[in-house]
Image (cartoon, grey):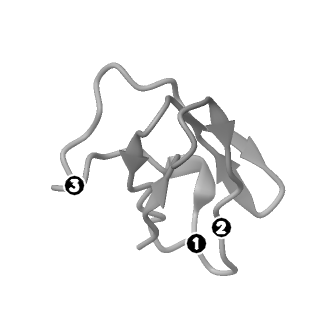
């Protein structure tokens, strides 16, 4: 599991991924691992996902095993 946090008060993107995980099936969740209904779906890139973060937002993009 990976948690990411935007700490500078702006918008940001981050690449999260690892070998052996299905990045295309990742769903953004809040810190309590509830799916975020209003979140922009993460873009899939080679080997990971790129979630867009709002100012000071914390998300957990769980990466299911492939």
Q: Badge 1: how crowded within 10 Å, few (<14), some, or many (20+)?
A: some
Q: Is residue 33 left or right of residue 48?
A: left
Identify the secondary structure beneath mark 3: loop
Q: Badge 2: how crowded within 10 Å, few (<14), some, or many (20+)?
A: many
Q: CA distance from mark 1 to mark 3?
A: 18 Å
Q: Who's the residue at 58% across and 72% down the image? A: 21
Q: Is residue 52 left or right of residue 34?
A: right
Q: CA distance from mark 2 to mark 1?
A: 7 Å
Quadrant location, the C terminus:
bottom right
Viewer-nearest residue: 35 or 9: 9
Foreground disc of the pair 1, 3:
3
Q: Position of residue 23 (x, y in %)?
A: 60, 57
Q: Are marks 3 and 2 in contact (CB under 8 Å)?
A: no
* Quarter-of-image position of residue 16: bottom right
* First in residue order: circle 1 vs circle 3: 1
Disc number for residue 21: 1
């Amino acid at each position: 599991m990976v948690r990411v946090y935007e700490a500078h008060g702006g918008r940001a993107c981050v690449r999260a991924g690892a070998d052996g995980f299905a990045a295309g099936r990742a769903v953004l969740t809040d810190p309590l691992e509830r799916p975020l209904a209003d979140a922009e779906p993460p873009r899939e890139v080679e080997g990971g996902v790129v979630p867009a973060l709002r100012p000071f937002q914390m998300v957990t993009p769980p990466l299911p095993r492939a």
